[in-house]
Each structure stands twice: as C-alpha cells, then as structure tokens.
Image (spheres, rainbow, N blue to C red):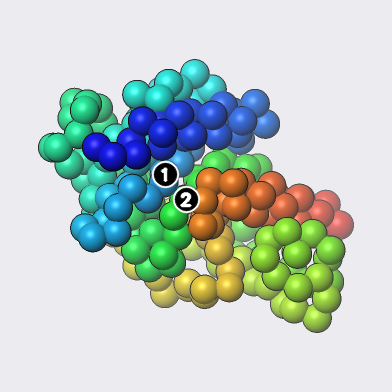
C-alpha cells in the first residue's frame, strides 16, 4: 500500500519519542496517520507492543470505523480498540495525524475539572495553536469507557475545530494535527499547560 512503509517508520520513531518521555508506559497509547481520504484509511500502531520498540512493520491499516482492512501487508496484525476513535477524530476534524498518550497531567486535570479544563493567558497556548492572551481555551473532558462508539459520540458532541484535543477521564489525552510533527508539538505544549494548571491551582 502506497506510503505505508514511510508511515510505519514515522509512527515507530514518534512512538519511541513518547515512550522515552514516559507517556506510553508498558504497551499503552497509540498513534495514527492518514494514508488516504476516499475511502478513509489510517495507519495505526499495532496493539499490545512496547511502543519504544516498534519497527516500520508494526502498523495496521484501518478504515474509518477502526477496523483492519484485508488489503495490507500484515492483515494478521491487530489494531488497538481505540483505532475506532482515531478514525472518528480523523473523519470529523480532517486531521492527518492523531496522537493518544497517557499523560498524567491530563488525567489529574480531568479529575479536578470534569466539565472541561479552562486555559487562558499563557504564552504556551500559541504552541497549541491558540492566542497567548484573551483567548479562553477549554479542553473537553469525556468519561472513559470501552465502547469506542460511545466515546466517539462524546468526542463529536464536544468537538471544536480550534481546539485539537480531547481528554478521556482516568485514561489519557488525544491530540491531532496536520501531520505527526504538528500533533507532537501540540501534545508537548498542552502537557505543559495542563501541568501548569494542575500545579498552580492546588
């Protein structure tokens, strides 16, 4: 499949980076990149593997519902159940890359502010794609669950085009962008912002 090997290399490199930060402990977390628009196809990291040790072959091609498609080099590999949410985010937002990491700051923030985490007047918001001043940013929080269709509905209900992130309570953070690099920068900036929020409002 066109672009799959390049996508696999990029996903493996990004996964190793997040694992080194402690954001993908054990086998947790997953990343995806868009391969095709019509029909929507994503390359998603394979389930159950140490994200610090992935190779370019440790990816699964899924459709918009997060289901592995048969026409791929390794149809026996299994995507995470969360691939369904990746597909929903990509379809709704138009994002070309989705990052799901288990950042502690996001989980703690969701515990404190289950209705959404408000951020304002912080320079790092520019790195997240918003203004540094007089721009109230609310990161939506949705309850955790194992039914990705329910989570997808909650995401879509809370979606705002100018807020490329979602916190799943007691679980982790989803961030997306035009490519893996933009998604990474947004994730890194948002982690800083959420950590500031939690530590400054104890």
Quick check: 188 left or right of 6?
right
The image's mark for residue 199 is none
Mark 1, Cα crowd under 10 Å, few <14 / some 14-19 / many 20+, is many
Quick check: 60 left or right of 105?
left
Residue drawn at x 81%, y 70% is 132
- How far from the left and from the top, in percent, is residue 199? 83, 52
Image vertical order of residue 146 relative to residue 150, above or below: above
Residue drawn at x 20%, y 34% is 72
Image vertical order of residue 38 relative to residue 157, above or below: above
Of the numbered discs 1 and 2, the one sitting upstream in the chain is: 1
Q: Which quadrant of the figure contains the C terminus?
A: bottom right
85 or 93, which lies in front? 93
13 or 174, which lies in front? 13
- Say which residue label 2 marks: 98
- How far from the left and from the top, in percent, is residue 192? 76, 50
Of all residues, the one furthest to the front in this rendering is 2
- How far from the left and from the top, in percent, is residue 3? 34, 39
- Say which residue label 1 marks: 32
Q: Secondary structure at mark 2?
A: strand
Q: Examine the image and state in which quarter residue 1 appears.
A: top left
Query: How many marks can you see?
Result: 2
Residue drawn at x 45%, y 29% is 9
- Asked if the residues shown at circle 1 and circle 2 are in contact, with their CB atoms under 8 angstroms apart, the answer is yes
Mark 2, Cα crowd under 10 Å, few <14 / some 14-19 / many 20+, is many
């Amino acid at each position: 499949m066109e672009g799959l090997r390049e996508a696999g290399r990029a996903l493996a490199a990004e996964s190793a980076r997040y694992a080194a930060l402690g954001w993908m402990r054990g086998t947790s977390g997953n990343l995806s990149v868009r391969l095709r628009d019509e029909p929507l196809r994503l390359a998603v990291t394979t389930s159950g593997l140490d994200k610090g040790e992935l190779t370019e072959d440790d990816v699964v091609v899924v459709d918009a519902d997060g289901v592995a498609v048969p026409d791929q080099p390794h149809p026996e590999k299994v995507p995470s159940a969360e691939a369904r949410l990746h597909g929903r985010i990509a379809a709704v937002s138009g994002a070309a890359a989705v990052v799901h990491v288990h950042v502690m700051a996001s989980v703690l923030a969701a515990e404190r502010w289950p209705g959404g985490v408000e951020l304002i007047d912080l320079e790092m918001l520019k790195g997240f794609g918003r203004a540094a001043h007089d721009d109230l940013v609310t990161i939506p929080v949705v309850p955790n669950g194992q039914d990705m269709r329910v989570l997808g509905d909650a995401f879509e209900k809370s979606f705002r085009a100018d807020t490329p992130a979602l916190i799943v309570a007691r679980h982790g953070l989803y961030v997306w962008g035009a490519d893996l690099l933009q998604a990474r920068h947004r994730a890194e900036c948002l982690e800083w912002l959420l950590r500031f929020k939690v530590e400054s409002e104890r």
